[in-house]
Image (spheres, rainbow, N blue to C red):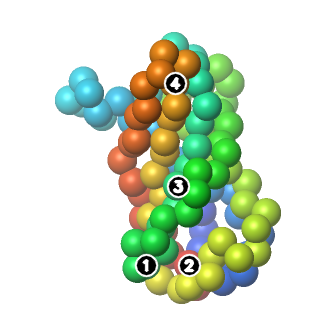
C-alpha cells in the first residue's frame, strides 16, 4: 500500500510511492527494477475512473530490487476531485515490453 497520507484537492508536492509487484510468478513479490531497466511511470485515476497521462516516476531505493517507484506531484490540477482514487505503475522496459502493475487506492480530501 502506498503511503500518501490524504492529499486534498489542489495539493502539490504529494509524493506518490507505489510498489511494483511481479504478478507473473503467482506470488506477488517485489518486481526487480534493477534487472528490468526502462522508463517507469505512475498513472492515477479519479473516482470516476478518468486516468491521468503517464506521470514520470523514478526508483525510490536504488538499485530498485524492492520494486518501489515514486512521482512527486507538482501539478495543482491533478487532484481535482475528492474521493477514492487509484494509482498503478506502468513500466516501459528496454526490451520493448510494457508492464502495468496492480493498483493501489488512496483518498483525496
**Other-residue count near label 1 (Cα within 10 Å), few / some / many at <14 / 14–19 / ≥20:** some
Extreme residue toward the front, this view: 96
Q: To which residue does mark 3 refer? A: 43
Q: Where is residue 14 drawn, in percent x and y? A: 71, 63
Q: Give the distance between the C-alpha atoms of the residues marked 4 and 2, in whole angstroms.
A: 30 Å
Could you tell which of marks 4 and 2 lies nearer the N-terminus? 4
Distance of label 2 from label 1 (alpha carbons): 9 Å
Q: Residue at x 35, y 30 (%)?
A: 22
Q: Which mark is residue 47?
A: 1
The residue at which mark 2 appears reads as 108
Residue 13, visible in the rendered structure: no
- Residue 69 lies, with reference to residue 25, above or below; the image says below
Mark 4 or mark 3, earlier in chain = 3
Count of labels shown? 4
Task: Name the spot of residue 9 as percent of width and height, x first.
Answer: 66, 83
Residue 78 against residue 33 in the figure, above or below: below
Q: Which mark is residue 93?
A: 4
Viewer-closest of 41 and 72: 41
Helix, strand or loop at disc 4? strand
Residue 83's tag is none
> Residue sitting at 59 percent across and 24 percent down?
38
Amino acid at each position: 500500500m502506498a503511503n500518501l497520507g490524504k492529499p486534498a484537492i489542489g495539493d502539490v508536492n504529494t509524493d506518490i510511492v507505489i510498489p511494483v509487484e511481479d504478478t507473473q510468478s503467482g506470488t506477488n513479490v517485489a518486481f526487480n527494477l534493477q534487472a528490468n531497466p526502462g522508463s517507469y511511470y505512475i498513472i492515477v485515476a479519479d473516482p470516476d475512473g478518468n486516468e491521468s497521462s503517464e506521470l514520470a516516476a523514478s526508483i525510490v531505493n536504488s538499485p530498485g530490487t524492492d520494486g518501489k517507484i515514486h512521482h512527486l506531484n507538482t501539478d495543482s490540477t491533478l487532484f481535482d476531485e475528492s474521493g477514492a482514487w487509484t494509482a498503478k505503475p506502468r513500466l516501459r522496459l528496454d526490451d520493448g515490453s510494457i508492464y502495468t502493475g496492480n493498483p493501489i487506492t488512496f483518498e483525496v480530501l
